[in-house]
Amino acid sequence: MSADAKLREHICMLAKSMFDRGLTGGSTGNISARTSDGGLLVSPTGTSFGRLDPSRLSYFDAEGKLIGGDAPTKEMQLHSAFYETRSSAGAVVHLHSCHSVALSMMPDANEDNFLPPLTPYAIMKLGKVKLLPFFMPGDPMMGEAVRGLAGKRSAVMLANHGPVVAGKDVEAACNAIEELEDTARLAMMTRHMNAKALQNDDVKVLVTKFDVE
C-alpha cells in the first residue's frame, strides 16, 4: 500500500473512532492532513466522520488546486489558515464536541486561555487555547480570525461551535483535540465545586519541561 493510501485509511479510521465515541455527530466535523508531496487530503462537505470513504477524500495538490475526490468541507478556510500560518502543521481537525461547546458558552469563559489548568495533558498537547467569537457556519472570517493569531496558537475554540486543532500529523492533531474535549468535560463537571487546579508554578514547569509553545 502506498503512503498516500495509508494516510487515507488512517484519516478515515481516526475519524470513525471519534464519531463512534460521540466526539462529533451527524455530518459535523472535518479533518485534513498533508500528503508526502505537499498536497492535502480533506474530508468532503456533508460527510459523516463515521462513514468517510478513503477514495472520495478531497485531494489538493501542493499549489492548493482541487484535483481529485469530492468537494471539500465548507470550512476549508479554517484548515487553510492553520497551514498558512503554522509551518509545523501536518494535520487539522475540527469537531462539534459537546463539552467544549458548553464551556465556550459560559459567561466567564477565558478568551485568551480557554481551558483551565486541571491536568497537565492539555497544557502539554495544546498550550493556550484561544476562544474566538461566534461566526456563522462557513463564514470566511473564521479563517481570517485564525490568520490574525499569526501562527501563535495550535488550537482555537469557536464559541457556540467547536474546537479546531493543528498537529504535526493527523494522529497528534486527533489526540490533542480529544484532550481539549476531555479537559472541557472536567471543567464542566467540576464547575462551581472549588476544584483544585494546577498552580502557576506547576504550569511553568510543564511548559519548560515539555517545550510547550
Image (tube, rainbow, N blue to C red):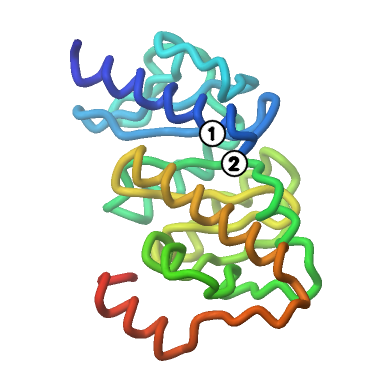
Which quadrant is the N terminus positioned in?
Answer: top left
Task: Note whether 115 is above or below 157 in the view shown.
Answer: below
At label 1, the amino acid type is Met
Circle on res. 149: none
Cα–Cα span, label 2 and label 1: 9 Å
At label 2, the amino acid type is Leu
In the rendered image, residue 204, in percent from the top left (x then y), is placed at 36, 85
Q: Does dot 2 land on a helix, a strand or a loop?
A: loop
The residue that label 1 is drawn on is 18
Query: Which residue: 65% across, 78% down?
Result: 195
Which quadrant is the C terminus positioned in?
Answer: bottom left
Query: Which residue: 61% across, 31% down?
Result: 74
Query: Which residue: 43% across, 42% down?
Result: 174
Q: Quadrant of residue 187?
A: bottom right
**Residue 131 in the figure: left or right of residue 63:** right
**Residue 63 in the figure: left or right of residue 157:** left
Count numbered badges in the picture.
2
Query: Which residue: 69% across, 53% down?
Result: 99
In the rendered image, residue 110, in percent from the top left (x then y), is placed at 65, 75
Furthest residue in direction right, as rendered: 107
Question: Between disc 2 and disc 1, whose residue precedes?
Answer: 1
From the viewer's side, name the closer residue of 129 and 82: 129
Q: Does dot 1 land on a helix, a strand or a loop?
A: helix
In the rendered image, residue 107, in percent from the top left (x then y), is placed at 81, 72
The residue that label 2 is drawn on is 95
Could you classify mark 2 by the number of other residues whose Cα lies within 10 Å: few (under 14), some (14-19), or many (20 or more)? many
Task: Note whether 208 is above or below 13 in the view shown.
Answer: below
From the viewer's side, name the closer residue of 171 and 151: 171
Question: Is there CB contact under 8 Å for labels 2 and 1?
Answer: yes
In the rendered image, residue 193, in percent from the top left (x then y), is placed at 75, 77
Could you classify mark 1 by the number of other residues whose Cα lies within 10 Å: few (under 14), some (14-19), or many (20 or more)? some
